[in-house]
Image (tube, rainbow, N blue to C red):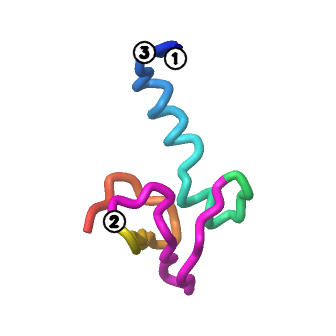
Amino acid sequence: MTTRVPWDSGGYLALARRACFVCELLAGNPDHPHHVAHRDEVAIVFASRSPSAVGHFLVAPFGHHEHAAA
């Protein structure tokens, strides 16, 4: 039987702000592996670890940006 754990939104936000997976990927952290399709001085393109469709890739600029949308 699985034990249910209440959602800790504050803890989740603290983790997300402390360990941005894009920043960790750019830093080469082995705990955040992704398949990188392209990388240059402007941006990085990598495969999503939780794809919503086959071939789902993410594009991110270098440098940390919060609340960015395209």
Residue 23 counted in the magenta span: no
Q: Residue 4 in the image: x percent, y percent? A: 46, 15
Front label number (3 vs 1)? 1
Name the residue: 58% across, 76% down: 36
- At mark 2, the secondary structure is loop
Q: Residue 59 in the image: x percent, y percent? A: 42, 73
Q: Which residue is mark 3?
A: 6
| Precedes in sequence: disc 1 or disc 2 | 1
Marks 1/2 in contact by CB < 8 Å: the verdict is no
Name the residue: 51% across, 13% down: 3
**40 versus 24 height, above or below:** below
Residue farthest to the front?
1
- At mark 1, the secondary structure is loop
Q: Say the numbered circle drawn on residue 40.
A: none
Mark 3 burial class by Cα count in 10 Å: few <14, some 14-19, many 20+: few
Left or right: residue 66 versus residue 49 is: left
